[in-house]
Amino acid sequence: MSDLLERLRGRGWRMTSQRRVVAEVLDGDHVHFTADEVHTRAAQRLPEISRATVYNTLGELVALGEVIEVATDGRAKRYDPNAHHPHQHLVCSGCGTVRDVHPARDPLADLPAEERFGFTVSRAEVTYRGLCPSCA
């Protein structure tokens, strides 16, 4: 389970019922829902929640650095609550399923100094692509 709810409470984020239900939907490992998927799941728990509220809440969570927007090949953005734990993504080219992965090596260490062109590199985003077992 991710620690999204605990982090938000620790920051003193005003936890309205709408914000709480969005955070609850996002809480967990390997969660990479689209905004529409978040809205559908949130509406099951709180039927009166609007799509606009979900989009606004997701935007706030991204701005706070508590959720990461993940864009894959022109598909709808997905929202990842695993913002404070270094990881990469494994994406199915067929259905778009996204999973968090933790490679053994640091991708920054794999970029030779002569390939940095003087940049001070602070992070690397690596996406692994392939077919999940259902699509293979």
Image (tube, rainbow, N blue to C red):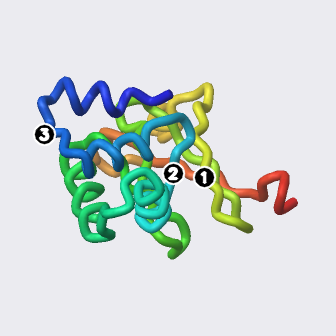
Disc 2/disc 3 C-alpha distance (Å): 23 Å
Disc 1/disc 2 C-alpha distance (Å): 6 Å
- The amino acid sitting under disc 1 is Val
| Observer able to see residue 56 | yes
Q: Which mark is residue 32?
A: 2
- 73 relative position to 9: left or right: right
Density class for disc 2 (Cα within 10 Å; few <14, some 14-19, many ≥20) is: many
* Marks 3 and 1 close (CB-CB < 8 Å): no
Q: Which secondary structure lies at badge 2? A: loop
Q: Which secondary structure lies at badge 1? A: strand
Upstream in sequence: badge 3 or badge 1: 3
- 14 relative position to 82: left or right: left
Give the residue at x 26% y 51%: 18
Upstream in sequence: badge 2 or badge 3: 3
Q: Nearer the viewer, residue 92 or 1?
A: 1
Density class for disc 3 (Cα within 10 Å; few <14, some 14-19, many ≥20) is: few
Give the residue at x 53% y 65%: 72
| Residue 35 position in % (x across, y down) | 41, 64
* Marks 1 and 2 close (CB-CB < 8 Å): yes
Upstream in sequence: badge 1 or badge 2: 2
Give the residue at x 43% y 51%: 45
Disc 3/disc 1 C-alpha distance (Å): 30 Å
Tell me the residue that label 3 is attached to.
Answer: 14
Tell me the residue that label 1 is attached to.
Answer: 98
In the picture, residue 26 is in which quadrant?
A: top left
Q: Which secondary structure lies at badge 3? A: loop
